[in-house]
Amino acid sequence: MLVLFPVLMIIAVLLFGSGFHNPLFLQKRVGLDGRIFVIFKFRTLRDRTCRPLSARGLRFAETLSSILRITGLDELPQFINVLRGDMSLVGPRPHSLADHHRFAQRIPDYAVRLAIKPGMTGWAQIQGWRGPVCSDDHLQARVACDLEYIRRQTPLFDCAILVRTVVLPFRTLARYRAQRQPQHALKPCLGHDRRLV
C-alpha cells in the first residue's frame, strides 16, 4: 500500500478532475461462505452526479476511464479489502448481490466458489474472462475456471497467476494500440454495462 499510495492518489486526482465528485466506488459483494462485504474500486462510469465537462474534457475522461478498466487499474483500491481480510490477492472474483443470486440459479456448482476468499485477480481473469458477464457461455467459462483454481490452488500457482496479472495490462494495452478498438482488448463484453461485474 505504501508503494501504491502515490499511484492511487494520482488516479484519484485525475478522476476528480474528470468530473467524478467521489473517485471511489463502493458496492456490496458476496465473499467467503456467503458473507457480505463492501468492495472498493475506482469509479469509471459517468452518471448524473458527475460534473459537466467540455467536449475536450469529456474525451479525456472517457479515455482515462477506458484505460483504467482495460488495464485493471480501477481495481487497485481492493488492496484495502485484502488488508481488511475480505479478499485475497488470488481467488474467484466476487460478484454483486444481484448477480450472485442470478448466477446461482443458472449454474448448479456456482456456490462452490464461496469455499475460499474472493480475489483481486484469478485464473478466470488470466484466461480472459474479465468484465461484465453477458452470456451463459461466459458465465460457465468463468465459473469453470474458478472451480479449476480451487482444485489446483497452491502457493506456486498463486505466484504464477500474480506474475501473469502484472504483465496483463501491458499485453492488453499493446493489443488495444494495435487494434485501436478498446472493446476487442478483452475476450467478452467490454462494451456492455460495467455495473454488471
Image: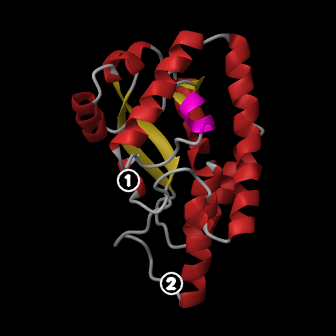
Question: Residue sitting at 62 percent across and 77 percent down?
Answer: 60
Question: Residue sitting at 54 percent across and 89 percent down?
Answer: 55
Task: Give the residue pinned by disc 2.
Answer: 53
Task: Give the residue pinned by disc 1.
Answer: 195
Is residue 86 located in the magenta-colored stretch of the structure?
Answer: no
The image quadrant where one finds the N terminus is top right
Q: Secondary structure at mark 2?
A: loop
Residue most toward the front? 137
The answer to which quarter of the image holds residue 128 is top right
Q: Which residues are magenta?
A: 123-127
Dot placed on the residue nearer the N-terminal end, 2 or 1: 2
Kindly identify the amino acid type of the residue bearing the numbered disc 1. Answer: Arg
Task: Report crowding for label 2: few under 14, some 14 to 19, many 20 or more residues within 10 A (C-alpha).
Answer: some
Magenta region, main secondary structure: helix
Q: Position of residue 96 (x, y in %)?
A: 34, 39
Kindly identify the amino acid type of the residue bearing the numbered disc 2. Answer: Leu
Q: Secondary structure at mark 1?
A: helix
